[in-house]
Image (cartoon, rainbow, N blue to C red):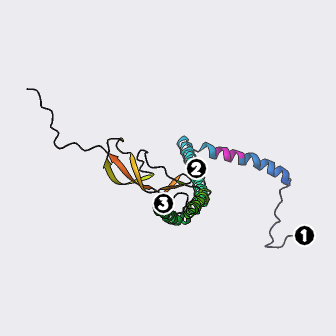
Amino acid sequence: MSRRRSGQKPEDKQDPTPPEEQEQQQAPLEAEAGESEAAEIAPEDIEQLRDQRDDLRDRLQRVSADYDNYKKRIRRDIEQSREFANEELIKALLGVLDDMERALEAARADHDEEDPLLKGMQIVHDNALATLGRFGLEPIEAEGKPFDPDKHAAMMQQPSEDHPPQTVLRELQKGYLLKGRTIRPAAVVVSAPPEKDNDEQEPQQES
């Protein structure tokens, strides 16, 4: 018989169990460990986790709603920018319309309505107004209408017995709307209650 040399360690014994059986044996142990960990979670901890979940869900809903509102606002601003892209140009042309109307008034004072010059000026004015009207410009109706602070600018008041108070008596400068929005209010004279006669005596009180 041969003897082992001194200092030589015996070979480690290998587990004869196949790897598949080893995994099957470890699986129940891991499941039991997971169940024990779940059993260790206290009810108040579960409630706290639910509260955190609900809070995060509410925050997400608010962020989503804010984002939808932001997209709608941006879309509306872009549409308005496109719709009123010519506003500054049309505002600048209102002064030209005013000059044409003043020229027409002066021409009517010295010329007959059938005068070719006056008729030509009127045609040019009407064509200019019609062209701007295709872009959404329209005059504001003022005279005889109730005073509207969104469309009229009161320059002065005039006592009147024939009109209710706050009625537009006459127009000093024409106002205009662009696609329903006021770009220049009409400058107007507004009616006021008639003034009382200073000589009118107050009724005497019965003794």
Residue appearing at x 50%, y 62% in the figure: 111
Q: Which residue type does callout 3 highlight?
A: Arg
Left or right: 4 as drawn, with respect to 191: right
In the rendered structure, which disc, 2 or 3, sits on the residue that comes first in sequence?
2
Q: Is residue 35 magenta?
A: yes
**Residue toward you, 67 or 133:** 133
So how many labels did they put on this image? 3
User: What SS does tag 2 mark?
Assistant: helix
Q: Residue furthest top?
A: 207
Percent x, y for residue 26?
76, 50
Quick check: can you spot residue 74?
no
Residue appearing at x 55%, y 66% in the figure: 89
Badge 2: few (under 14), some or many (20 or more) residues near its Cα, within 10 Å? few
Q: Which mark is residue 65?
A: 2
Q: Which residue type does callout 2 highlight?
A: Ala
Percent x, y for residue 51?
54, 45
Q: Residue furthest right?
A: 1
In the rendered structure, which disc, 1 or 3, sits on the residue that comes first in sequence?
1
Left or right: 149 as drawn, with respect to 78: left
Give the labeled residue for mark 3. 108
**Label 1 – label 3 distance at C-alpha:** 144 Å
Q: Residue furthest bottom?
A: 6
Q: Which mark is residue 2?
A: 1
Q: Is residue 109 magenta?
A: no
**Residue toward you, 61 or 192:** 192
Q: Looking at the magenta stretch, what is its main secondary structure?
A: helix
Percent x, y for residue 177?
52, 54
**Label 2 – label 3 distance at C-alpha:** 62 Å
Residue extent of the magenta highlight: 31-36
User: What SS does tag 3 mark?
Assistant: helix
Residue appearing at x 15%, y 33% in the figure: 203
In the rendered structure, which disc, 2 or 1, sits on the residue that comes first in sequence?
1
